[in-house]
Image: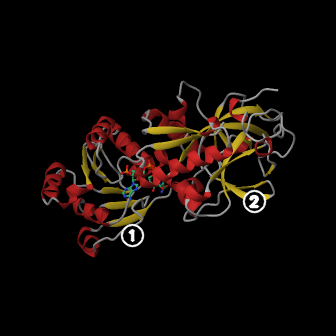
Amino acid sequence: MLRHPFTRSVRPNRVYAKLKLAGFATSAIRNAVANRAVVFTANGNPAEVLRVQSYDPPSSPAPDSVQVRFRLSPINPSDINVVQGVYPATPMKMQLGGEDVHVGGNEGLAEVVEVGSEVQGLKKGDWVISAKPQAGTWSSFRTLRAEDVIKLPEGRLSEVNAATITASTVNPPTAYNMLHEFVHLKEGDWVLQNGANSAVGQAVIQIAARKGIKTINFVRNRPDLDHLMNQLAQLGATHVFTYDALSDKSLAKHVKQWTSESPIRLMLNCVSGPDTTAMTRLLGDNAHIVSYGAMSKKPLSLPTSLFIFKNLCAQGFWQSRWYQQHSRQERENLMKTLADFKLKEPEHEILDLSTESSDEAATQRLRDVLVKMEEGFGKKVLLRLG
Ligand SMILES: NC(=O)c1ccc[n+]([C@@H]2O[C@H](COP(=O)([O-])OP(=O)(O)OC[C@H]3O[C@@H](n4cnc5c(N)ncnc54)[C@H](OP(=O)(O)O)[C@@H]3O)[C@@H](O)[C@H]2O)c1
């Protein structure tokens, strides 16, 4: 029997804990590789309620299904919100050792490892993503219906690029759609955004730059600010400021000079709170502020005068709603369009929990990283579970 190195010191009863749910088999163990999932039983602080749990590998897939192995699955802010119970999405459910648990993870790069007898168009080794949200991507293996997976275009992609860019159902699509669905932008136009170093913000900078659209970007101050500013400039950012610059009255004057031919008509809001309110002073007439995140956890307050005298329009964007309202073909077209931009992946760190000697050690390592993320980690964390 093959043994994966990390199973050596794992107690057998934990490695082979019974797991029942749609997509996870409860049957006999076919090899000794410990499959792991990041699960929770009750909403709460992720660093307290998430745990890593081993489970039986799935049995061979049904004729219409494929077995996939997740290679890298991002931990996005919305995944954290799902665990906290403050996001309108239901995580995947399963039974683990007689207990109902949720498996975290909405998106992830997976590889087909076994194909059901009636499946067409998919083969072992293909890279795929789940077409359905909340697929429980923080797990090693899943069995998915073939119709619920989307095959990635074949090519020489790195795992990280595929997981964060090409196969991402969340961040680059959000950036692209926000730049296209609210204001008709042409070359030379300007876009204002906060949270500019987020994965979405970095995609906004790159897509805008490729289209000749200029960006004014705001980020939080930090010790290595120069490094971040250079990094965003290399992606194509026209200007990068910290929120502190908003208290400098000359900023509005400079922005007016830069944009006088083309006043800013689109502002993308990832953060909310008072700094975001201050940013709206930089907008021109008939502008749209599109909110897609609330990272400050503060409300968005907008001066009434902007609505009356500048005809401001305030809207929200949710990529999940976009998927509900668009066909699978439109979704695949969007993926192809985004692939052509050849976006650079965000700074990231791979959290490989498959190498931990026990579920307890893996849980502790995960929780340590979650605490750092809460404090502002500055990098996208990508989970590898085996
Ligand atoms: N509506 C949609 O369809 C949609 C789609 C994708 C993402 N989103 C949302 O977009 C946001 C960004 O997602 P992401 O995956 O791109 O994030 P990410 O790469 O994990 O980056 C998080 C960003 O939030 C900033 N941030 C964290 N705490 C903050 C605070 N208290 N005040 C100000 N900024 C703070 C971070 O800045 P520092 O580097 O300074 O910590 C960083 O720029 C999230 O709210 C997410 O839920 C929405």
Report x, y in % for residue 98: 81, 57
| Observer-nearest of 357 and 269 | 357
Report x, y in % for residue 249: 14, 60
Q: Is residue 322 visible?
A: no
Q: Which residue is mark 1?
A: 299
Describe residue 257's horizontal placement relative to residue 314 as left or right: left
Q: Amino acid at mark 1?
A: Pro
Measure how far apart labels 1 and 2 are at the Cα level: 34 Å
Q: Quadrant of the C terminus?
A: top right
Q: Which residue is mark 2?
A: 100
Describe residue 99's horizontal placement relative to residue 365 as left or right: right
Q: Secondary structure at mark 1?
A: loop
Report x, y in % for residue 18: 81, 48
Asked if labels 2 and 1 touch by Cβ distance under 8 angstroms, the answer is no
Q: Quadrant of the N terminus?
A: top right
Q: Can you tell which mark lies on residue 203?
A: none
Report x, y in % for residue 342: 44, 32
